[in-house]
Amino acid sequence: MNSMLKMAAAVAAAALPLTAAEVTGKVTLKGTPPPANIIAAVKADANCGKVAKGDAKTRTYVVGADGGLANTIVYIKKGLEGKTFPVPSTKPEIDQAGCMYQPYVAAVMVGQKFDVKNSDPFMHNVNATPKINKGFNFAQASQGQVNEKVFDKAEMGIRFACNVHPWMIAYVSVMENPFFVVTDDKGTFAIKGDLPDGKYTLEAFHQKAGALTQEIEVKGGKATTDFAFDVK
Ligand SMILES: [Cu+2]
């Protein structure tokens, strides 16, 4: 191979990850949601009261100053049928800290392991009640205890609850492909990965506000779109 051909081959190889894509945008909530409630039971509880940091509040709608809606899962819902993708190498953590689940909303891919942790120096109980997947219900008696879990079927909004502290709730969604993300506290999202150019249905899913879909086209690895939910 002459040097020009070698160079051309090297350039082609370097350009190979052409599918590295980014789907970005913002999720907002129109109108004014009901205010978050202070969960007085946290401070009133003999154990929780010792570890609570500030006032624990309900998280039905977590909205930023400009209407940005947090805790919304944005993901590619259609357009990838028949394709398989590797499970993300990251291992999300669902923590119990200050008698609240952190985060309130999480998403994992089918087959992606995640940790359930107890950061508090007393017992919590983790009761996951899926409709499609297999549920589990176990105690985490000691501080720092970690249990690894995995779901093997796609399912949105699996409820996690603690039977010791009834206000402790979290929602975990199990996604079919790795192209998903949970909006941050400004409502923004950026789905990154080896997503081929093409047309897709993008869905924004919020545990209370519901789901909205948009047709998008990823071109040159880029697409951007916004979602606006009504208060429900
Ligand atoms: Cu608990």
Image (cartoon, grey):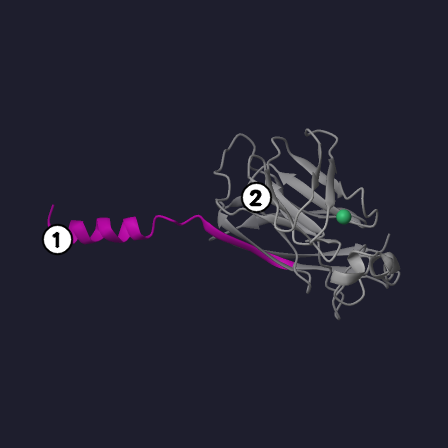
Report which quarter residue 33 is drawn in.
bottom right
Residues in magenta? 1-25
Report which quarter residue 199 is drawn in.
top right
The residue labelled by disc 1 is: 3
Looking at the image, which residue is at 73% across and 46% down? Answer: 124
Q: Is 151 contained in the magenta span?
A: no
Give the percent coordinates (x, y) of residue 84. 50, 33
Work out whether residue 68 or residue 41 is closer to the camera in this orientation and state it.
41
Q: The N terminus is located in which quarter? A: top left
Give the percent coordinates (x, y) of residue 71. 71, 54
Q: Is residue 58 visible?
A: yes
Give the percent coordinates (x, y) of residue 184. 65, 60
Q: N-terminal of the two: label 2 or label 1?
A: 1
Q: Is residue 201 visible?
A: no
Q: Label 2: few (<14), some or many (≥20) within 10 Å? A: some
Residue 225's place in the image compared with 149, above or below, is below
Looking at the image, which residue is at 33% across and 52% down? Answer: 15
Residue 109's place in the image compared with 189, above or below, is above
Name the amino acid type tagged 2.
Lys
The residue labelled by disc 2 is: 199
Q: Please say if the residues under marks 2 and 1 sit with CB atoms less than 8 Å apart.
A: no
Q: Label 1: few (<14), some or many (≥20) within 10 Å? A: few
Q: Which mark is residue 215?
A: none
Number of disc labels: 2
- Asked which secondary structure carries label 2, the reply is strand
Residue 157's place in the image compared with 15, above or below, is above
Name the amino acid type tagged 1.
Ser
- Asked which secondary structure carries label 1, the reply is helix
Report which quarter residue 200 is drawn in.
top right
Give the percent coordinates (x, y) of residue 208. 81, 49
